[in-house]
Image: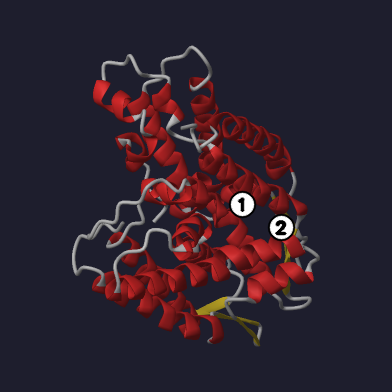
Amino acid sequence: MARRSFGGLNAPLALSLTALILAVPASTLPFVTLARFGNTRTSTLLSGSRGLWRHHMPSLSTWVLFCGVVAPLLEITFLALILTWWRRDAHDHSNPWVKAAHQLQHWSMPEIHVLAVLVSFFKIGSLAQTTMGVGFYCYAAAATAMLAAWQTFTLEPARVLATQAATPEKKEAT
Amino acid sequence: MTNPFSDLPRKDLAASFALAATVMLIPANVLPVMTFATAGSPPNVTTIFGGVALLWNENLWALALIVFTASVAVPGLKLGGLAWLLYSVRGGRRPNSRRLTRLYSMINAIGRWSMLDVFLVAFLTGAVRFRNLASVTPMHGIIAFASVVILTMIATQLFDPRLLWETNEDDDQTDEAHTAENPVNSKAHQRVKPNA
């Protein structure tokens, strides 16, 4: 089920747990601070989604919240749970979390969110004095840890499809 | 045993979603995506392409290139690629399976990067709020653009790359054609990695 390049299941588990821990300060601490003519405004990870909601775009707000916050959080949680489970027991291909984590991979986009914030920094550089907050650094680090975790561990789609089709399962120790 | 992966409806569904995305591409590029208002100057209403031009004019060429790639080139390439894939699996055709599977993998990998502009507008809306001094207001173009991203991603997920191999049994790549009979274990399918 898993393709591993180094560290067995320990490396992706460590990386996913790191991402999970970093998700806490990323979602609570200041993301970015803007200052203009003495006025200072601090925003958090959820400010963008809240801003869209305030401008009567609830569907887009929900979508941004899902792709930037909820999906990555669920994805990494599921991945950590799967890896913890597999380290103790035999690999269970029919685990619904495997399917869920695989599906969430498509919609989880923290790295794109990070790039968008970086582009925004340059875009508004002439408008206001911008300062990156600890929350942003934690979010970027969590996104990197997630990418690294997937580099050491892959859910093979063919296997996932096999599970969905309820074909005879062939458990293999990886 | 019948094929549990009913291909035909999925292919048609993928085509429907791709068509819907193509239609939505028009308002996404024509309508403004946000308004940048600063004290002492008229509000700056920007479209997707206008945002790229603005970055270019401010000599932020690298950023302009990134935004252009993510917001203009990727949706266009993705829809073009999907159209090619869907056309290739139409009856009677013998697609180049290997090359088209690679194209599918590429489309699957790059499609999500179009969300860059949506995240950018969301971030600016939340961050730039200085009452009368400066503010960013999202416009309806960004909803149309987000729908293009979602529709193309769903279309890609619905398209089954095994179709590229099923119509190619007499191809000179006999090994792949043989394994395509058992799609779950086919090399073609294993080559398509999820977005990591």
Report the quarter where the N terminus of chain A lies.
bottom left
SS for tag 2? strand
Chain where mark 1 sits: B
- Residue ID at (36%, 34%): B102
Report the quarter where the C terminus of chain A lies.
bottom left
Residue B51 circle label: 1
Please name whichever residue, A126 or B141, is drawn nearer the observer in this view of the structure: B141
Residue at the far left in the pictured view:
A6
Residue A30 visible in the current orientation? no
* Quarter of the view holding residue A152: bottom left
- Residue ID at (70%, 74%): A50
Residue B170, compared with residue A90, is above or below; it is: above
In the drawing, does residue B107 fall left or right of residue A129? left
In x, y percent, where is residue B191? Answer: 32, 41
For disc 2, the marked residue is B34
* Quarter of the view holding residue A155: bottom left
Chain where mark 2 sits: B
- Residue ID at (49%, 54%): A106
